[in-house]
Image (cartoon, rainbow, N blue to C red):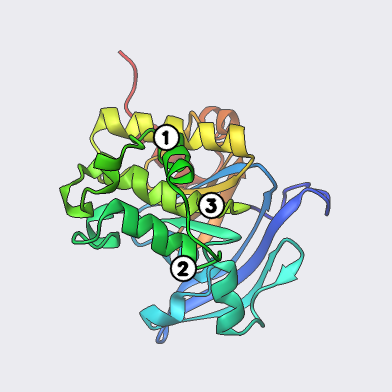
Amino acid sequence: MSSGSSLSSADELLKYRLNARYGATPVLREVEGRLAAGEIAALVGLSGSGKSTLALALQRLLHYRGGRVDGSIVLEGTELMGLSESAMRSIRGRRIGYVPQSPGTALNPKLRVRTLIDETWSAHARGRMDDAARQTLLERVQLPGTGAFLDQRAGELSTGQGQRLLIALAILHGPALLIADEPTSALDAITQAAVLRLFAELNRELGTAILFISHDLLSVASIAHRVDILHEGSVVESGPPGRIFGEPVHPFTRDLVDAMPKRP
């Protein structure tokens, strides 16, 4: 995601250069990035650094939060910044999947799992999704594909089950890009590790490129092909995890690495 990436045009899935602000307050300052097809790139930064702003900006959703964006977003060779809202609705969920932070706020607790899947399906496909397809989808994210589970309401699910359901909804239409915005921050350590493994598995089996946004450098070390460090609205360092962990260059990156728990 840094301008130093050496991707060929054939490999390049996403390329962007953005500024974003809320009112007169700038949040992203000339943030430039690239993502290759099938790559997992982790974007790491503290709260308030602009991570979630970038996630919304890449989907052309920031104006719904009162923000303004200018610059360029090229996905699969198409410039998104000039597209109409109706055109963007055909891309969101179909070519860009999004996994938000908390199932408690993202899922309607009164709706059944079956209904949530069917509504997501009907947003970009005609006809009805059959039971076998629902079962395959749920089992892919390590959820039971049984009728009993499909009949549960979202509010009855555990936080871990809810997060897996959000991932299932995000991959339903086979997007080329999955944006995961702090998807493990509400989970306990064991469930967090399982969800991280799930993202790595989806990337490996489906070839989905993932922009994994987190405040926790350690949590992304095992799955990311590349780590980008966001600090005060700008990417200050980018590189493979081994280099970021072993030879951090920017003072902020060194502080992050120094703050990581050390093995006894």
Q: Nearer the viewer, residue 262 or 149?
A: 149
Label 3's element?
strand
The span from disc 1 to disc 3 (Cα, nearest Å) is: 19 Å
Q: Is residue 225 visible in the rendered structure shown here?
A: no
Q: Nearer the viewer, residue 241 or 13?
A: 13
Q: Which residue is mark 1?
A: 139
Please rate how many residues cluster around mark 3, counting C-alpha atoms within 10 Å: few if below 14, some from 14 to 19, many from 20.
many
Question: Residue at 42% across / 47% down in the picture?
Answer: 167
Question: Residue at 46% across / 53% down in the picture?
Answer: 170
Question: Residue at 64% across / 68% down in the picture?
Answer: 17
The span from disc 1 to disc 2 (Cα, nearest Å) is: 28 Å
Of the 4 image quadrants, the one containing the C terminus is top left
Label 1's element?
helix
Above or below, comparing residue 157 to residue 13 in the picture: above
Above or below, comparing residue 110 to residue 213 in the picture: below
Q: Earlier in the sequence, mark 1 or mark 2?
A: 2
Q: Which residue is mark 3?
A: 178
Q: Amino acid at mark 1?
A: Glu
Residue 187 image position (x, y, % from top left): 25, 40
Residue 85 image position (x, y, % from top left): 55, 83
Q: Is residue 202 left or right of residue 207?
A: left
Discs 2, 3 touching: Cβ within 8 Å:
no
Residue 148 image position (x, y, % from top left): 24, 40
The span from disc 2 to disc 3 (Cα, nearest Å) is: 12 Å
Q: Amino acid at mark 2?
A: Leu
Number of the label disc, if any, that sits on residue 56 = 2
Q: Amino acid at mark 3?
A: Leu
Quarter of the image where one finds residue 25: bottom left
Q: Earlier in the sequence, mark 2 or mark 3?
A: 2
